């Protein structure tokens, strides 16, 4: 007798039984070939998915540090421009 089922497809159109498998396939595709011989990308992709919350928190902290770094550079640039005296221009002869 026929029956229905649910499946998931990765970005390449490959069929997987679970959403996790399809996502791991997509992540591995983004990572590309890692290592010699059989790629380590699928295992790394699986670990990325497993540690997603920790990785997202790390990237959020990274974004905050980038904002702080940009603010510090802008403040230093403003301080430097306050300390620069402009010399009067000389007429050309």
Image (tube, rainbow, N blue to C red):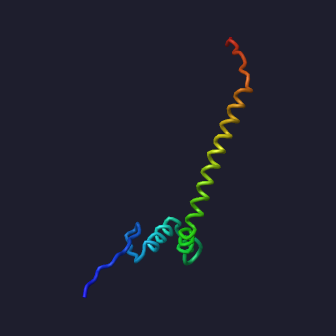
Residue 87 is drawn in which quadrant? top right
Which residue occupies the foreground of this view, 89 or 70?
70
In the depicted structure, whether residue 67 falls above or below residue 55: above
In the depicted structure, whether residue 89 falls above or below residue 77: above
In the depicted structure, whether residue 18 falls above or below residue 2: above
**What is the x, y in percent for residue 10?**
41, 69
**What is the x, y in percent for residue 9?**
38, 71
The N terminus: image quadrant: bottom left
The single residue placed furthest to the left in the displayed view is 1
The C terminus: image quadrant: top right
Q: Name the residue at 47% across, 71% down.
A: 25
The single residue placed furthest to the bottom in the displayed view is 1
Which residue occupies the foreground of this view, 59 or 87?
59
Query: Residue 49 vs residue 66: left or right?
Result: left
Which residue occupies the foreground of this view, 45 or 61?
61
Residue 69 is drawn in which quadrant? top right
Q: Name the residue at 50% across, 65% down.
A: 30
Q: Name the residue at 56% across, 64% down.
A: 53
């Amino acid at each position: 007798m026929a029956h229905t089922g649910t499946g998931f497809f990765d970005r390449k159109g490959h069929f997987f039984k679970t959403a996790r498998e399809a996502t791991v396939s997509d992540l591995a595709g983004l990572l590309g070939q890692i290592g010699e011989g059989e790629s380590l990308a699928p295992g790394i992709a699986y670990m990325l998915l497993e540690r997603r919350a920790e990785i997202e928190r790390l990237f959020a902290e990274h974004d905050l540090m980038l904002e702080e770094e940009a603010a510090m550079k802008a403040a230093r640039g403003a301080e430097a421009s306050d300390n620069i005296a402009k010399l009067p221009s000389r007429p050309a002869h």
